[in-house]
Every structure is written in structure tokens, then in C-alpha cells.
Image (tube, rainbow, N blue to C red):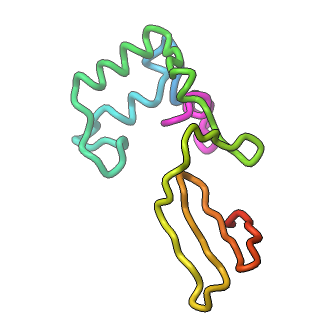
Amino acid sequence: MTDFKRFARRRRKTKALLLVPGHQDQSSILKMVKPKDGEVRMPKGKAQLAGVEVDLISAWIQQGAEDDTPADAKKHYDPDHPPIYFRPPVVTSLDYSPDGNCWRWLAFTKSSFMNKTGRSFPAV
């Protein structure tokens, strides 16, 4: 649940809405987090939410379920919009081929290769 728009749209298989702002009874997310026969569907593989957490989700839905994600948390990177570094990135991994003809490094979210001629190209 990191993208509000994806979270709020209709499910493909069931056609159900996880979230209907202002309507707890129509928001299937509550059915998933509330225990039924001692079992919960969400969070999958984790301990069930505390009652106060379920109440908080219920209140948020009843109050209109607004997307209050901070603007700076919505930044997304892609090949056309790469991250802008304000200082040199930390190289977290460095590797080379056994024959020494190719180098690979990983910095932040970017992985690159360089051959012995100095030609650099992004990793796939």
C-alpha cells in the first residue's frame, strides 16, 4: 500500500473497492484487517493489527480517506527522470570480471558496467 491511486481503485478479480471514502461498510479493506473466525487476511503472514489500528483505519475512511502523502514522498525515478545527487553517491558494491576486462559497481539505486576501453553502460 505505497501508492494511494492503486490502493483506491477497483480490484480486477473481485471488482470490489478496497476503499470507498466515507463508507466503512463498502470498503473491503476493513473486512481484510478485521478478524473473522480468529483469522485475518491482512497483513499477510504477519500478526493481526491491534484494535486501535483497525479503529484508526475505520475513522480515516469515515472522514473521507484523503491522500495525505507528503509531496516529497511522491517522487519517482525512471530513465527519463533519474535521481539528482547533491553529493557523490556511495559505492556499495564493486566487482570485476576474472579477466579484468569488465567492472561493475552499484551506487544508490544505479548499477553500471565499464569495459577496459573505458566505455560505460547501464546494467540491465
Asked which quadrant contains residue 63, the reply is top left
What residue is at 69 percent from the left and 44 percent from the top?
A: 82
Image quarter hosting the C terminus: bottom right
Depth order, front residue of 13/89? 89
Please provide percent x and percent y for residue 19. Answer: 52, 24
Whole-percent x, y for residue 85 in the image: 60, 41
Q: Where is residue 103 drawn, in percent x and y?
A: 62, 75
Q: In this rendered view, identify the residue nearer to me: 65 or 119.
A: 119
Residue occupying the far bottom of the picture: 99
Picture coordinates of residue 61, whole percent (x, y): 44, 16
Q: Which residue is depicted at the point 56% across and 33% down? A: 3
State the image quarter where residue 55 is shown: top left
Judge from the rendering whether residue 97 lies leftward or rightward of residue 45; answer left or right: right
Residue lying at the far top in this picture: please name it: 63
Dividing the picture into quarters, in which one does residue 34 lie?
top left
Asked if residue 7 is among those painted magenta in the image, a careful observer would answer yes
x 64%, y 41%: residue: 83
Predominant secondary structure, magenta span:
loop
Q: Is residue 58 left or right of residue 69?
A: left
Q: Which residues are magenta?
A: 1-17
Position above or below: 95 against 71: below
Total marks shown come to 0
Q: Where 7 falls versus 62 (above or below)?
A: below
> Does the stretch in magenta take in 42?
no
